[in-house]
Image (spheres, rainbow, N blue to C red):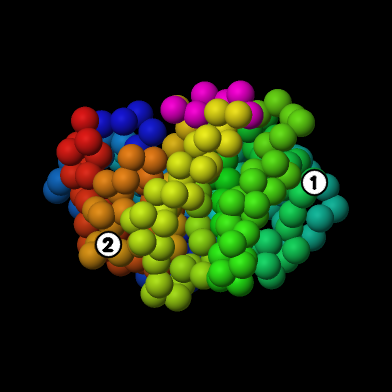
């Protein structure tokens, strides 16, 4: 199995406390029943459940990540949670640049670069998200958009490549029930890996995940692509059995490739 194999759950803004508690308990019980996974599996709940997740998943192979973070330690930034605070409560990972942050909160460019830099400086591994809209794909701009999003956060600065995971999430496939075909996913992932090579990164070591309506039914076919190293799973991660089925599909697909 490749050392790049990786799986993350993005719960987004979902679940009440009792539901979060139940889902964490189900994940813990599934691992007890089936055994720890031979690759990193990271759960990213809403900020209000981070401490609960760290506590409930303690002693398992599951790690906890945040869906967002602000660069720095402390400051007069009402409503924000800093990278330093995330690390202090036990997070190991943080998502940066998700399309929903870009679209609804206007995040781009310099801010995303600062987030990546500060998170890595505080020993958080960054899941950096990129992806094109339907209009951009139909206009033949997919690669230009991906390159622009890679450059805005990862160029002209020192990047700790061992603390970076890239997630390709075509915006048109997030929460829509649509998903890129395996061929479309591989094409985008191959482009990203080639960009990493040209940027001087250890391209063969950086995980590149696919996100965008990943489900048990399509996971294995997507994960069988050589440059699709795993997934950033949204809606399906809210159902423990479905998320574990996706993890099993990832293990099967990557086991078959080695």
Q: Main secondary structure of the magenta part?
A: loop
Quadrant position of residue 79: bottom right
Please tell me which residue is depicted at 62% across the width and 59% down the height of the picture.
Answer: 141
Q: Nearer the viewer, residue 207 or 74?
A: 207
Q: Residue furthest right?
A: 76
* Residue 42, position as x, y percentages in the image: 41, 46
Is the residue 216 above or below the residue 65 in the image?
A: below
Please tell me which residue is depicted at 40% across the width and 72% down the height of the picture.
Answer: 178
Please tell me which residue is depicted at 15% across the width and 46% down the height of the picture.
Answer: 34
Is the residue 120 above or below the residue 185 in the image?
A: above
Query: SS of the residue at dot 1?
Result: helix
Query: SS of the residue at dot 2?
Result: helix
The quadrant of the picture occupied by the N terminus is top left
Residue 216 appears in the rendering: yes
Q: Would residue 56 be found to the left or right of residue 44 on screen? A: left
Q: Would residue 244 be found to the left or right of residue 65 on screen? A: left
The quadrant of the picture occupied by the C terminus is top left
Quadrant position of residue 73: top right
Q: Would residue 120 be found to the left or right of residue 113 on screen? A: left
Q: What's the distance in space between the residues labelled 2 and 1, CA to CA?
A: 36 Å
Q: Residues within 10 Å of mark 1 (few under 14, many from 20)?
A: few
Q: Nearer the viewer, residue 94 or 23?
A: 94
* Residue 47, position as x, y percentages in the image: 57, 58
Please provide the residue range marked out in magenta: 199-204
Residue 93 appears in the rendering: no
Circle 1 is placed at which residue position? Answer: 110
* Magenta-drawn stretch contains 169: no
Q: Residues within 10 Å of mark 2 (few under 14, many from 20)?
A: some
Tag of residue 17: none
Circle 2 is placed at which residue position? Answer: 218
Please tell me which residue is depicted at 51% across the width and 70% down the height of the picture.
Answer: 172
* Residue 163, position as x, y percentages in the image: 54, 31
């Amino acid at each position: 199995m490749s050392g790049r194999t990786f799986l993350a759950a993005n719960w987004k803004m979902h679940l009440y406390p009792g539901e979060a508690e139940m889902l964490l308990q189900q994940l813990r019980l599934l691992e007890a029943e089936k055994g720890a996974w031979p690759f990193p599996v990271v759960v990213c709940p809403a900020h209000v459940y981070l401490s609960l997740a760290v506590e409930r998943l303690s002693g398992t192979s599951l790690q906890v990540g945040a869906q967002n973070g602000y660069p720095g330690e402390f400051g007069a930034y009402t409503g924000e949670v800093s990278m330093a605070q995330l690390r202090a409560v036990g997070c190991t990972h943080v998502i940066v640049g998700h399309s929903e942050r870009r679209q609804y909160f206007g995040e781009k460019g310099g801010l995303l670069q600062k987030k990546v830099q500060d998170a890595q400086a505080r020993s958080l591994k960054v899941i950096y998200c990129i992806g094109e809209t339907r209009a951009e794909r139909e206009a033949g701009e997919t690669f230009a958009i991906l390159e622009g999003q890679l450059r805005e956060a990862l160029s002209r600065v020192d990047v700790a490549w061992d603390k970076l995971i890239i997630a390709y999430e075509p915006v048109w496939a997030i929460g829509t029930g649509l998903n890129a075909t395996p061929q479309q996913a591989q094409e985008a992932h191959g482009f990203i890996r080639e960009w990493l090579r040209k940027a001087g990164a250890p391209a063969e070591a950086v995980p590149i995940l696919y996100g965008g309506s990943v489900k048990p039914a399509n996971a294995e076919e997507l994960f069988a692509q050589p440059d699709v190293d795993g997934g950033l799973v949204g809606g399906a991660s809210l159902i423990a059995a479905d998320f574990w089925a996706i993890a099993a599909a990832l293990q099967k697909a990557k086991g078959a490739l080695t």
